Image (spheres, coloured by chain):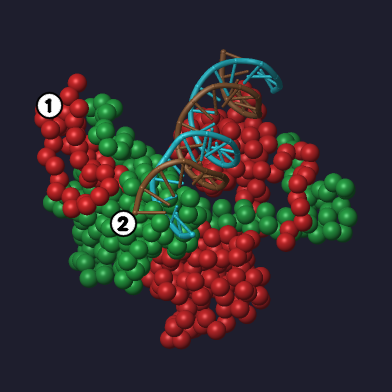
Chain colours: A green, B red, C cyan, D brown
DNA sequence: CTTTGTGAACTTGTTCACAGCT
DNA sequence: AGCTGTGAACAAGTTCACAAAG
């Protein structure tokens, strides 16, 4: 659909790596805190520490945006706040709808940091007619029949899905059909969308499972280290595997 | 602190890439759905589609776990569910505490998928004495004075932080001091933790900002494409930059 | 002398394409 | 014949280390 966009202004080719984009909000938050404390300038070292990354990465990230620092000095806080905000598109404000006003949807609607940075909750939508009209976070819930009309009237392009898993895909399709092109999905499902629509997912149980993996690995390392120290062979856990490599037995190679 | 763990059992060196680990929960979810529909086997192609990845990636991911498939046939659903569960550490169950029982904490406590897969909410903790004893999701909230005792008594190693931003770092430190080594952080702050402690963060406003970036880029592309088509030069947005490269002006290079 | 900005080296992750089993 | 498992090519992301700028 899009015309071939091969060239770009000579200045700086608009190819900010995805990993960098994902960190800009982090930098912006750290910078905003500095700005509130009226700190005028900050070095890559200090800012990196505040954002929890290393300074080389931060400098490289900023280099994709342009040359915004002063050698020997650092970065001007206000100026960087502005540049990053603009880069992220936060100088305009984005109306957002939240669909599915259960526990989570209500929590999201109440979330303060929402309105602060360029986002405005344009509507709360739920399929339960009993919810209609009830105010949540000061905004009356509307019935999902109104979904298309709300999207169009408010020019909404970002939708948040906080419905049960089963409802997510149909809701997603209605949002997209009505003109939404970015979706933040809290439902534990894979959403299928047409090209040109962005989906990001937030999934509690996936995050916990990743933590469990590392937690288990830590326990294994400990056991192995202990066995190492004792010079003993660790006990074999009884795994009922009938093929594939053995279960993950903490074995020890004597030095 | 850890003993040098350089060797490993000859079988299959325990080095599952992080990116693969992050996808295992996705595969597991798809497989569980198949299992519930009593589907006996599945091909990499089918499973990949269900998990929203491509089949080469899925096969490569599985190859890190071992050779669990059958050529010409596919993967045994039940068997894979078991292997992935074991790999993720979900065959044991993990007691979890949630600290900060506001809107979000309550929503998390009520989240069903929590208990289902190896995780058990061992306690809900809040700093407000008025909350103490109140049941949320059937579990009585306990006061934060009890935090250390709860962690130790229940052998909790995973903590979820759902407090306001300001409280997150102190809470984090108490959790870690009491023995927690994995933290899921919902507060919009960077947590600083000692080595050996894992932190994962879930941050609504970061996700929205990333979406806004892409949304803005889409709008720019559209405008540029339109300008292209018209053979006209797009209007210059009045940016008040005093240095650095120009604002992101959609310029056009005439062929 | 301090701190940025960035090529170049390195590491991690993805995709390709096909040999090897069943 | 069909589908997995995996080396090899490729792409993305990170870190190093230092020249250039103030």
Residue B148 image point, x, y percent: 61, 78
The residue beneath circle 2 is: A80
Q: Tell me the quarter of the image containing the N terminus of chain B.
A: bottom right
**Residue under mark 1: which chain is it in?**
B
Same chain for the residues at labels 2 and 1, yes or no?
A: no
**In the displayed image of the protein, which residue is found farthest to the bottom?**
B129
Q: Residues within 10 Å of mark 2 (few under 14, many from 20)?
A: some
Left or right: B40 as drawn, with respect to B128: right
Q: Tell me the residue at 64%/38% (across/down).
A: B64
User: Is the residue under label 1 in contact with that under label 2 (CB below 8 Å)?
Assistant: no
Q: Is residue A188 above or below residue C12?
A: below
Q: Quadrant of residue A133?
A: bottom left
Q: Nearer the viewer, residue D3 or A96?
A: A96
**Residue under mark 2: which chain is it in?**
A
Q: Tell me the residue at 36%/44% (across/down).
A: A64
Q: Quadrant of residue B72?
A: top right
Q: Is residue B253 visible?
A: yes
Viewer-nearest of labels 2 and 1? 2
Q: Tell me the residue at 35%/63% (across/down).
A: A41
Q: Tell me the quarter of the image containing the C terminus of chain B.
A: top left
Q: Is residue A150 above or below residue B19?
A: below
Q: Nearer the viewer, residue A54 or B31?
A: A54
Q: Residues within 10 Å of mark 1 (few under 14, many from 20)?
A: some
Q: Nearer the viewer, residue B201 or B42?
A: B201
Q: Secondary structure at mark 2?
A: helix
Q: Tell me the residue at 21%/67% (across/down).
A: A139
The residue beneath circle 1 is: B231
Q: Which mark is residue A45?
A: none
Residue B95 image point, x, y percent: 60, 66
Could you tell me how far apart the alpha carbons at marks 2 and 1 are, in whole angstroms?
A: 34 Å
């Amino acid at each position: 659909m899009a015309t071939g966009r091969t060239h770009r202004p000579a200045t700086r080719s608009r190819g900010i790596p995805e990993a960098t984009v994902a960190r800009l909000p982090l930098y912006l938050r750290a910078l905003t805190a500095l700005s509130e404390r009226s700190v005028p300038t900050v070095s890559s070292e200090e800012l990196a520490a505040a954002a929890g990354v290393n300074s080389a990465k931060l400098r490289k990230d900023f280099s994709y945006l342009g040359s915004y620092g002063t050698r020997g000095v650092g970065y001007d806080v206000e100026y960087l706040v502005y540049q990053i905000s603009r880069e992220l598109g936060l100088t305009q404000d984005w109306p957002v709808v939240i669909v599915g006003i259960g526990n989570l949807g209500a929590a999201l609607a109440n979330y303060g940091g929402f309105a602060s940075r360029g986002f405005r909750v344009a509507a709360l939508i739920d399929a339960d007619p009993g919810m209609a009209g009830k105010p949540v976070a000061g905004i009356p819930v509307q019935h999902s029949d109104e979904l298309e009309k709300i999207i169009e009237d408010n020019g909404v392009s970002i939708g948040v899905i906080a419905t049960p898993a089963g409802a997510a895909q149909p809701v997603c399709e209605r949002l997209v059909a009505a003109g939404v092109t970015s979706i933040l999905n809290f439902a534990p499902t894979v959403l299928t969308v047409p090209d040109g629509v962005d989906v990001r997912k937030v999934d509690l149980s996936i995050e916990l499972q990743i933590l469990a993996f590392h937690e288990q690995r830590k326990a294994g390392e400990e056991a192995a280290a202990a066995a190492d120290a004792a010079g003993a062979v660790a006990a074999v856990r009884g795994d009922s595997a009938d093929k594939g490599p053995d279960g993950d037995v903490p074995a020890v190679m004597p030095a």
